[in-house]
Image (cartoon, rainbow, N blue to C red):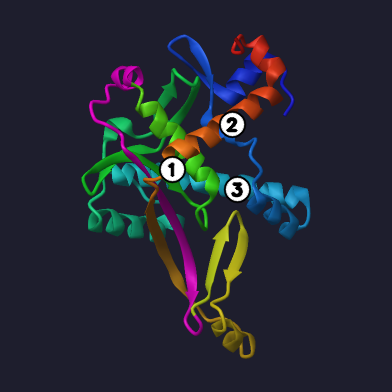
Amino acid sequence: MRYTGVHHFQEENGYEIQGAWFPRVTRILEIKAKPGLDHFFREVGDYASAETIKVKSAEEGSRVHETAEKILAGEAVLIPDEIRPAMDALEAFAKKHSIIVFPEFVERRMWSERYRYAGTIDALAMIRGKVGVLDIKTSNGFYPEFNLQTAAYVSAFQELGVRKALGCSFAVETRWILRINQHEVCRQCGATKRTKGGRMKVRENGSGGALCASGNGHEWGGVVGDVELREFPNNVHRDIRAFLAAKILWEWENDYWLRQAGYVR
């Protein structure tokens, strides 16, 4: 990306907190290769179309994030019709699993004084008696960079000075990914069809798909929500080391602008 000046670089890549500028966790992790994204661009076939789908998908994801966070925090919210199946599934899932979200820590900006980075968490939550970072994703699966992102957040919350500044009186001991999705299911073979960013993606259900392929095609039912929660209690220290390695590479890549910003010591 081209920058018009140091202020443009800082606005695009980080936050100013308590008079100091810190790079964002998500921007740092863009330095990491993403094979799934590369496969997506190859599958679409041309860059312009893929970029259009990507931008529209991000907009849809933001809508899901905003609505889901309000639902989890117990706020009244007008649910858009196009994501209602996913949100209905989320409400039922959160009730079943007794997910408690701390409203004051929804979309809360945090930072690490020790490692000098910042980010915005989706929420702090209590699940099964443990408090941790809850990160919402609208992807079709779980990807390794999710672990690096959440490890960076957990590590920052383990700094006493940061917890005190944020008014966080409890220990943050774990992290979860809450994956929220919706799709249609074939009534005959169980294949799923997901539409995101205006692009339709069908996942066949093993040998069952052959039945539909040899007949009149899939018979799609209505759209249903799909919610999955995974905890990643292990390897936090390994993941934070991997995140910091990515940060070193990102700093190397952006050395000129970081020096202009006075970030490089």
Q: Pointer 3: residues within 10 angstroms few (<14), some, or many (20+)?
A: some
Q: Secondary structure at mark 2?
A: helix
Callout 3–callout 1 Cβ contact below 8 Å = no
First to last magenta residue range: 160-189
Residue topped by disc 2: 245
Q: Give the quadrant of the C terminus.
A: top right
**Amino acid identity at mark 2:** Ala
Left-right relation of 96 to 132: left
Name the residue at 60% across, 33% down: 246
**Amino acid identity at mark 1:** Asn
**Relative to 131, does residue 54 appear above or below in the rendering?**
below
Left-right relation of 229 to 1: left
Residue topped by disc 3: 56
In front here: 140 or 68? 140
Which of the 4 image quarters holds residue 65? top left
**Amino acid identity at mark 3:** Lys
Residue topped by disc 1: 235
Name the residue at 42% across, 32% down: 153
Picture coordinates of residue 3, whole percent (x, y) = 71, 21
**Relative to 87, does residue 190 appear above or below in the rendering?**
below
Query: Which label's residue is closer to the chain start, 3 or 1?
Result: 3
**Relative to 264, does residue 78 appear above or below in the rendering?**
below
Q: Pointer 1: residues within 10 angstroms few (<14), some, or many (20+)?
A: few
In front here: 111 or 158? 158
Distance of mark 2 from mark 3, alpha carbons? 31 Å
Q: Secondary structure at mark 1?
A: loop
Picture coordinates of residue 77, whole percent (x, y) = 32, 45
Name the residue at 59% across, 21% down: 11
